[in-house]
Amino acid sequence: MQTRYVTITSSTQLNWSIINWHSVPQEVSFAAISTGGSSWNINLCYEDPTGVFPSPNSSAPTAFALVTGGSSNQVATVGTSLKPFTGYQFQLTSASTGGKIVFCVNQSGIG
């Protein structure tokens, strides 16, 4: 397992990141470390975020909210009803002055 870090300092929507869907069972956890009271979301998708196998409905994956309106340090795990999924996205919805968000992702398995 290797932790991935993403730091966000301004209101922006990042690209989708791929999860290793070959890892069985799929165990993924997210942590948000917030300074300054910014608010944020964590989204999941079930379509291929790379577009290699595009969705018949849209050119972009459909976002499903795992956490909405987070504003402080928080940990989220993906429950059984939401697995398996193919990707995730962090979204800073309101940036506070001088604040930043560091998102951490951990997934069991190799890679």
Image (cartoon, helix red, strand yellow):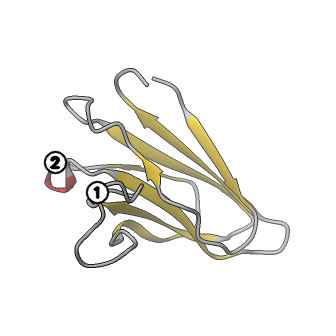
Nearest to the eye among marks 2 and 1: give it. 1
Using the image, determine if residue 9 lies above or below residue 86.
Answer: below
Q: Secondary structure at mark 1?
A: loop
Q: As shown in the figure, which amino acid type bears the numbered disc 1?
A: Phe
At 68% across and 75% down in the image, what residue appears? 11
- Disc 2 versus disc 1: distance between alpha carbons? 24 Å
Q: Is residue 83 left or right of residue 33?
A: left
Q: Nearer the viewer, residue 64 or 69?
A: 64
Say which mark, if any, is on residue 104: none
At 48% across and 60% down in the image, what residue appears? 89
At 29% across and 36% down in the image, what residue appears? 27
Q: Position of residue 90 (x, y in %)?
A: 53, 61
Q: Is residue 26 left or right of residue 18?
A: left
Q: Position of residue 65 (x, y in %)?
A: 35, 69
Q: Is residue 11 left or right of residue 109?
A: right
Q: Position of residue 105 (x, y in %)?
A: 49, 41
Mark nearer the N terminus (2 vs 1): 1
Point out the image quarter for the C terminus: top left
Other residues around mark 2 within 10 Å, as few (<14) / some (14–19) / many (≥20): few
Read off the residue under disc 1.
53
Residue furthest out toward the left: 81
Read off the residue under disc 2.
80
Q: Secondary structure at mark 2?
A: helix
Q: Are marks 2 and 1 in contact (CB under 8 Å)?
A: no
